[in-house]
Amino acid sequence: MIVTNTVKQTKEQIKKWQKAGKSIGFVPTMGYLHEGHQSLIQESIAHNDITVVSIFVNPTQFGANEDLDKYPRDFAADSSLCQEAGVDLIFHPEPDAMYPPGFCSLVDITRLKYSLCGKSRPDHFQGVCTVVAKLFNIVNPDRAYFGQKDAQQLTIIKQMAKDLDFDIEIVGCQIIREADGLAKSSRNSYLTPQQREQATILNKALVQAQSHARSGFTDIAGLKEEMIATINTMPLADIDYVEIVDSKTLEPVMEFNDDILIALAVRFGATRLIDNTTIPFKQEEK
Ligand code: AMP
């Protein structure tokens, strides 16, 4: 497994592989890898000759009062996980290698970023689009793998790749959960035992809403209120948002007449967790 820190080294190695006719799969991450990341890596390995993982805690997607400095990092553990999984190259740049002095270009989108996480993180998706566009240009993959866990990010990246003519297949991968249903996240490591226990309510609220929606319950406002009430049974849960949106536009819906995304963000202390589920619209429900 090769580890690179600079854009130049990375491009040179990838060009060698591409000259030899190899297909490239790419998994962008911020490190502190867990089974969620691992599942993306496995998908890439299954469908490409070469798998590249980037590990970069991207400063430009963090707001001023967010957790950039304390974001968990463990390159030695990440590196072993990648090695064991069969990753071919880890790109592990320092911020200066990605944003050298004089850097002043940004990639932004004008839809999809104002709802859900964009409301409380106004500059987040500009940071994500900019770094992902840069990484796409550096790695030049055939396919790139993103988790459905960050549903808004996945939708935005698909749109950006289409709009900017990146010739890359964006592959969405299912959410990997702990045994008790909590979505795996690098940020789960911040939780105290009590917060960790209470955080299981997020998946419970989603599963409850899912079963109501599937059994033909179409009162969207009622569904949302019920989820809020369920989450609020946990005294340590502080809701940022619970939203039921159109899965394509990410705008709130009042009626169930297309596929919907039920998404939430909830704080436990300073730790903000997100989760979601998608419910396909069944024609006979009309
Ligand atoms: P991060 O390191 O948190 O930026 O995540 C890197 C990639 O892994 C993103 O595409 C995430 O959506 C994905 N990911 C993170 N957690 C999970 C999970 N529990 N299941 C599936 N994918 C995940």
Image: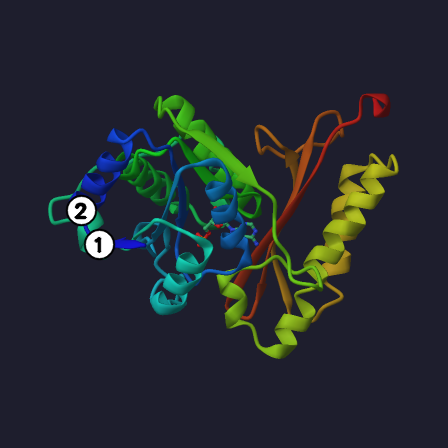
Neighbours of disc 1 within 10 Å: few (<14), some (14-19), many (20+): some
Element under disc 1: loop
Residue 110, numbered label: none
Residue 136 % position (x, y): 32, 36
Extreme residue in the bottom direction = 193
Q: Residue at x 44, y 59 (%)?
A: 84
- Residue 193 appears left or right of 19: right
Describe the colour scheme in one phrase.
rainbow
Q: Is mark 1 within 8 Å of ligand 1?
A: no
Extreme residue in the front direction = 20
Q: Residue at x 77, y 38 (%)?
A: 220
Would you say residue 67 is visible in this rendering? no
Q: Is residue 229 above or below residue 173?
A: below
Q: Residue at x 52, y 40 (%)?
A: 152
Residue bearing mark 1: 5
Q: Nearer the viewer, residue 173 or 124?
A: 173
Instruction: Quadrant for residue 273, please give it.
Output: bottom right
Please state the total of marks drawn on the protein image: 2
At label 1, the amino acid type is: Asn
Picture quarter with the N terminus: bottom left
Residue 9, numbered label: 2
Residue 256 % position (x, y): 76, 30
Element under disc 2: helix
**How far apart are labels 1 and 2 at the CA level?**
7 Å
Neighbours of disc 2 within 10 Å: few (<14), some (14-19), many (20+): few
- Residue 279 appears left or right of 143: right
At label 2, the amino acid type is: Gln
Residue 19 % position (x, y): 24, 30
- Residue 253 appears left or right of 122: right
Q: Is mark 2 within 8 Å of ligand 1?
A: no
Q: Are marks 1 and 2 in contact (CB under 8 Å)?
A: yes
